[in-house]
Amino acid sequence: MENKVIDSRTNREGDMTRRRRECLNCGERFTTYERIETTPLLVVKKDGRREEFDRRKIMSGIQKACQKRPVSIEQMEEIVDRVEKHFQESGEKEVSAVTVGEKVVKELYHLDGVAYVRFASVYRDFKDANEFLSELRNFVKNKEDH
């Protein structure tokens, strides 16, 4: 079937193109959607298992860390977008869960101190209160220095 493109539009995210087409034989018009096909990014867990990068898991962790904090859903989504984009642009096919967690920790560090400490305490799996207090002291000291 031969057709011609009448109109093309890219969505806001830039990852999909909508094309209006017309069949050259019968004149009927139809729409196609084209997405950029990417190789899935795999996350290597601490126990060696591999699973596909999942935005929802990152968002869930960020939401828990930001609970009852003055952080909007949009700000949380922007963090997830930046983290995902960072790893997609890195060209790596696999990334460790530790590396993903560190990227999220860095993003939260600049956004909200309480959310940062909450996420870091779960993610870094502090063994006792002293490790937690040490992280908190470093955070407060660094914020005071800047």
Image (tube, rainbow, N blue to C red):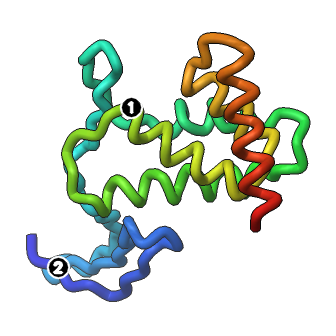
* Number of numbered callouts drawn: 2
Instruction: Tell me: 28 left or right of 67.
Output: left
In the image, which disc is placed on residue 41? none
Label 1 packing within 10 angstroms: few (<14), some (14-19), many (20+): some
Q: Residue at x 29, y 64 (%)?
A: 34
Residue 23: quarter of image = bottom left
Camera-side residue: 27 or 90? 90
Mark 2 and mark 1: Cα distance apart in space: 46 Å
**Which quadrant is the C terminus positioned in?**
bottom right
**Residue at 60% of width from left, 12% of height from top?**
127
Quarter in which the N terminus is drawn: bottom left
Q: Position of residue 12 (x, y in %)?
A: 52, 73
- Can residue 8 be seen in this snapshot? yes
Q: Earlier in the sequence, mark 2 or mark 1?
A: 2
Relative depth, front residue between 18 and 75 = 75
Relative side of 20 to 70, left or right: left
Residue 115 percent coordinates (x, y): 76, 39
| Amino acid type at mark 2 | Asn
Residue 35 visible in the displayed image? no
Quick one: 84 or 113, which is closer to the camera? 113
Residue under pointer 2: 3
Residue carrying label 1: 97
The local secondary structure at tag 2 comes to: strand
Residue at image coords 34%, 69%: 30
Quadrant assignment, res 38:
bottom left
Q: Position of residue 84 (x, y in %)?
A: 44, 52
